[in-house]
């Protein structure tokens, strides 16, 4: 639950970052989108939109700017009547009246022909505003859209056409814009609001004014709450056919090139100063921006608006991916978690790139920050959990193994745990013979002292020889070698510990005799075999132990020592593993409940003398061990 809570918190933070859009994140996202647009711009010609350019050559041939209104009217009439353009948009604002005849012709064209005039709305608050109609009486806004309730970008001033032309115009569009913080034009206001009225974008007015306009319900993908629309910029400058104005007026262009197209009249002449920066070009003409806008609106008219549904799916995918990542990080190593994080980042980058190519503005860096933040939060959290688990493991094992073994476990880190596994172990079981008889006549304190002293004789050698103390059995113990650490000489270690136990008990008996107390005898059984080793306890109590037939065999060997002249009995399997200790057979043992008979051994160094000279066996000892099989 904590991990999922962290994932949810990071998701909410990611959404908050995306909503707030810090300037640095915004700048990074836009830079990536610009690069994508530059490398994925459509190839081929855009055959629906054409630009008529009042270029330097046209100014040289037809006269410097401003041209007469008759020349402008001639250009428009040629485009509409002779070349069959669907609509003509003039990227020119006529702030002052010109020659009366030319103005009258322009007014008639603006009133009855598919001609769109331009006006500039200013979106920068100023005190006092510099672009205000009431400060310049000849200016007048036109093209009001009545009854619209759509979100519009507030404007604080304007430059309009002179009153006579504005009053006659049927279609007028705004060519004003607000560049981003880095000076690049990426957004345009679809509708602008000034003094309670709505005014359309120049390219939108051009489509609505065309002889054959597209459907009225044009979908504008990614229109923001501020009324700004992200222009997709799908077409490079080379995709648009640009014809100089003087060639139009001289009829030097084929009719097929202009027929049925949306025509934008603008200027690339440096003297007219119409330059903007876009994601595709550091410096381009305003007419080309309008052409891009018209192309994008035509594309939007032909496409279904699935942006809300797609955005919802992306948000859901982001939430699910973070939740699944939080779940997966707990089961992966650090390198695996890092690879998963990298894969998620690459997938999201692919999604965002695909969205950019379709004209959407899906974020790049906010989700990446979220993924990295989730990784940075979960890695320390998992490290802390691992440390806690390691401390738990070490705390549990500290009750069972010697400090050198514990240190080795700490050094090897997470290679070992309490998880039960099958391992080959050598088991040692030691017990006091006649414990009940020895303690029955003693006072409680004396019995406790005897028990603690005897168990000390058993425990110290086990830990000194790096054995694992499984459990105490009242007056004895069970220990094993081979887990949790592998031990190639585990059988020899067990026998060495057993011999030291015998020596410790002899010292203990010498002390007791000196105190006027009775001596005690230890019995030890050792056997080797496969066992299930690990934490086989419950949630209420952990217990690191071993379970298997070898434990039962060692117990029977320990019991068999009661009828043998040796305190240490070694099973056949353990005897085969010995490398440093020499042994001899002391008999055989019938395993209760089976037909198996195993040979049993004791080490020569046990102080019992040399083995019998005949074949290393003692028939008398074999006979005495036979009854022990029923114990």
Image (cartoon, rainbow, N blue to C red):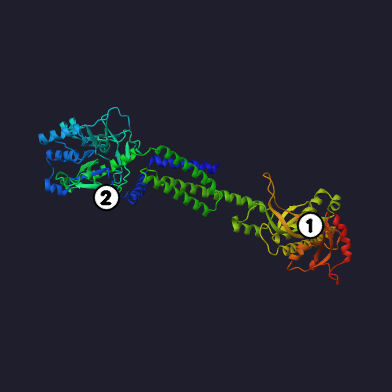
Query: Which residue reaches farthest bottom?
Result: 613
Residue name at image x 14 percent, y 45 percent: 250
When the figure is inspected, residue 208 is found, relative to residue 358, above or below; the finding is: above
Read off the residue under disc 2. Answer: 238
- Position of the C terminus, as image quadrant, is bottom right
Residue 251 point in image, percent of width and height: 16, 45
Relative depth, front residue between 41 and 437 = 41
Residue name at image x 82 percent, y 66 percent: 585
Crowd around label 2: few <14 · some 14–19 · many ≥20 (10 Å): few
For the residues bearing labels 1 and 2, Cβ distance under 8 angstroms: no
Read off the residue under disc 1. Answer: 553
Residue 620 point in image, percent of width and height: 89, 65
- Position of the N terminus, as image quadrant, is top right
Residue 228 point in image, percent of width and height: 32, 38
Relative depth, front residue between 380 and 136 = 136
Of the numbered discs in the image, which one, if any, rests on residue 287? none
Direction from residue 369 to residue 68 in the image, left or right? left
What distance separates the C-alpha of mark 1 from that of mark 2? 90 Å
Residue name at image x 87 percent, y 63 percent: 622
Q: Secondary structure at mark 1?
A: helix
């Amino acid at each position: 639950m904590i991990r999922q809570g962290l994932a949810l918190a990071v998701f909410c933070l990611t959404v908050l970052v995306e909503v707030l859009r810090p300037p640095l994140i915004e700048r990074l996202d836009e830079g990536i989108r610009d690069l994508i647009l530059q490398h994925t711009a459509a190839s081929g010609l855009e055959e629906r939109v054409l630009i008529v350019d009042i270029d330097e050559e046209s100014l040289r041939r037809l006269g410097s700017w401003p041209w007469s209104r008759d020349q402008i009217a001639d250009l428009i009439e040629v485009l509409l009547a002779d070349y069959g353009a669907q609509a003509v948009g003039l990227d020119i604002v006529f702030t002052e009246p010109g020659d009366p005849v030319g103005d009258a012709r322009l007014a008639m064209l603006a009133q009855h022909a598919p001609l769109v005039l331009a006006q500039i709305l200013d979106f920068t608050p100023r005190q006092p505003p510099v672009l205000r109609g009431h400060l310049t009486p000849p200016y007048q806004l036109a093209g009001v859209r009545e009854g619209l309730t759509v979100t519009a970008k507030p404007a604080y001033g304007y430059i309009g056409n002179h009153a006579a032309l504005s009053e006659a115009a049927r279609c007028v569009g705004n060519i004003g814009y607000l560049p981003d913080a880095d000076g690049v034009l990426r957004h345009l206001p679809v509708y602008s609001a000034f003094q309670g009225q709505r005014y359309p974008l120049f390219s939108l007015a051009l489509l609505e004014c065309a002889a054959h306009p597209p459907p009225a319900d044009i979908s504008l993908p990614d229109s923001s709450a501020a009324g700004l629309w992200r222009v997709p910029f799908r077409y490079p400058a080379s995709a648009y056919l640009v014809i100089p104005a003087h060639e139009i007026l001289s009829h030097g262009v084929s009719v097929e090139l202009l027929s049925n197209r949306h025509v934008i009249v603008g200027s690339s002449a440096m003297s007219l100063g119409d330059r903007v920066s876009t994601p595709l070009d550091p410096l381009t003409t305003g007419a080309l921006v309008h052409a891009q806008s018209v192309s994008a609106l035509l594309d939007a008219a032909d496409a279904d608006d699935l942006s809300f549904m797609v955005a919802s799916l992306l948000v859901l995918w982001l939430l699910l991916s973070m939740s699944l990542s939080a779940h997966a990080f707990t089961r992966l190593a650090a390198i695996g978690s890092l690879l998963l994080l990298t894969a998620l980042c690459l997938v999201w980058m692919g999604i965002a790139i695909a969205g950019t190519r379709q004209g959407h503005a899906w974020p790049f860096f906010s989700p990446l920050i979220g993924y990295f933040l989730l990784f940075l939060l979960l890695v320390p959290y998992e490290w802390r959990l691992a440390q806690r688990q390691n401390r738990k493991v070490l705390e549990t094992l500290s009750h069972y193994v010697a400090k050198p073994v514990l240190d080795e476990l700490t050094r090897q880190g997470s290679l070992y745990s309490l998880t039960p596994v099958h391992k080959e172990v050598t088991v040692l079981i030691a017990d006091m013979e006649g414990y009940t008889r020895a303690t029955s006549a003693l006072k409680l304190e004396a019995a406790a002292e005897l028990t603690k002293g005897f168990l000390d004789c058993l425990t110290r050698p086990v830990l000194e020889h790096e054995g694992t103390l499984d459990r105490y059995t009242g007056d004895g113990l069970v220990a094993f070698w081979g887990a949790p650490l592998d031990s190639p000489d585990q059988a020899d270690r067990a026998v060495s510990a057993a011999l030291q136990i015998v020596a410790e008990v002899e010292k203990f008996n010498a002390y007791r005799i000196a105190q006027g107390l009775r001596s005690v005898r230890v019995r030890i059984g050792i056997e080797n075999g496969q066992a299930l080793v690990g934490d086989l306890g419950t949630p209420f109590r952990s217990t690191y132990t071993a379970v298997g037939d070898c434990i039962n065999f060692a117990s029977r060997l320990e019991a068999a020592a009661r009828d043998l002249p040796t305190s240490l009995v070694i099973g056949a399997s353990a005897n085969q593993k010995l490398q440093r200790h020499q042994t001899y057979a002391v008999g055989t043992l019938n395993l209760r409940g089976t037909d198996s008979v195993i040979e049993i051994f004791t080490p020569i160094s046990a102080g019992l003398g040399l083995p019998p000279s005949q074949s290393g066996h003692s028939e008398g000892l074999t006979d005495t061990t036979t009854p022990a099989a029923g114990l």
